[in-house]
């Protein structure tokens, strides 16, 4: 069975932004200043946000972008961080021969930023 590509869209952006904001609130509650975060995109087009020490990640499939999240990050900084990580994951996919017609949909950086900024409003 062939997997249909599903391009990164506002649903993905909303989910990643909400997860990052929830994580920021958790860090504040727990008195943690920052944590490592990673965006993962799978061949099927799903996107997820992971946090903490990457050595605990057990599933290494898909395409990745990495950064860190601070309790001091405002929504705009979170948007910029997520856009950068999504761009990294798209670059990783491209480096591995995955194009927009299969696997993950790979938007251009400008489109990623447009989508992320719309979600943060």
Image (tube, rainbow, N blue to C red):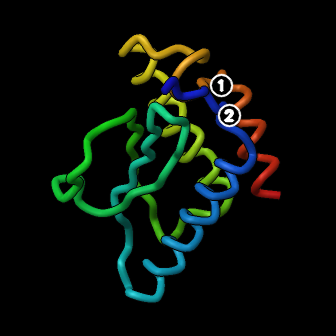
| Direction from residue 16 to residue 27 in the image, left or right | left
Tag 1 near tag 2, CB within 8 Å: yes
Q: Quadrant of residue 101?
A: top right
Q: Quadrant of residue 94?
A: top left
Task: Give the x, y percent position of residue 116.
Answer: 71, 45
Residue under the point 63% across and 58% down:
15
Residue under the point 59% across and 68% down:
21
Cα–Cα gap, marks 1 and 2: 6 Å
Residue under the point 35% across and 64% down:
35
Above or below: residue 89 compared with residue 25: above
Q: Earlier in the sequence, mark 1 or mark 2?
A: 1
* Image mark for residue 107: 1
Number of numbered callouts drawn: 2
Give the quarter of the figure containing the C terminus.
bottom right
Crowding at dot 2, Cα within 10 Å, few <14 / some 14-19 / many 20+, comes out as many
Crowding at dot 1, Cα within 10 Å, few <14 / some 14-19 / many 20+, comes out as some
Task: Give the x, y percent position of residue 108.
Answer: 66, 21
Residue under the point 23% across and 59% down:
53
Q: Mark 1 falls on what kind of element?
A: loop
Above or below: residue 24 compared with residue 82: below
Task: Give the x, y percent position of residue 69.
Answer: 45, 60
Which residue in the protein does label 2 denote? 112
Q: Nearer the viewer, mark 1 or mark 2?
A: 1
Q: Mark 2 falls on what kind of element?
A: helix
| Direction from residue 52 to residue 9 in the image, left or right | right
Task: Give the x, y percent position of residue 83.
Answer: 59, 40
Q: Quadrant of residue 4?
A: top right
């Amino acid at each position: 069975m062939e997997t249909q590509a599903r391009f990164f869209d506002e649903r993905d952006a909303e989910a990643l932004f909400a997860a990052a904001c929830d994580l920021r609130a958790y860090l504040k509650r727990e008195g943690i200043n920052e944590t490592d975060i990673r965006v993962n995109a799978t061949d099927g087009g799903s996107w997820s946000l992971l946090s903490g020490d990457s050595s605990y990640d057990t599933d290494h499939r898909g395409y990745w972008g990495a950064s860190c999240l601070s309790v001091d990050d405002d929504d705009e900084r979170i948007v910029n961080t997520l856009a950068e990580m999504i761009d990294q994951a798209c670059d990783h996919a491209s480096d591995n021969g995955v194009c927009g017609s299969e696997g993950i949909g790979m938007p251009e950086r400008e489109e990623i930023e447009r989508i992320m900024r719309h979600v943060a409003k």
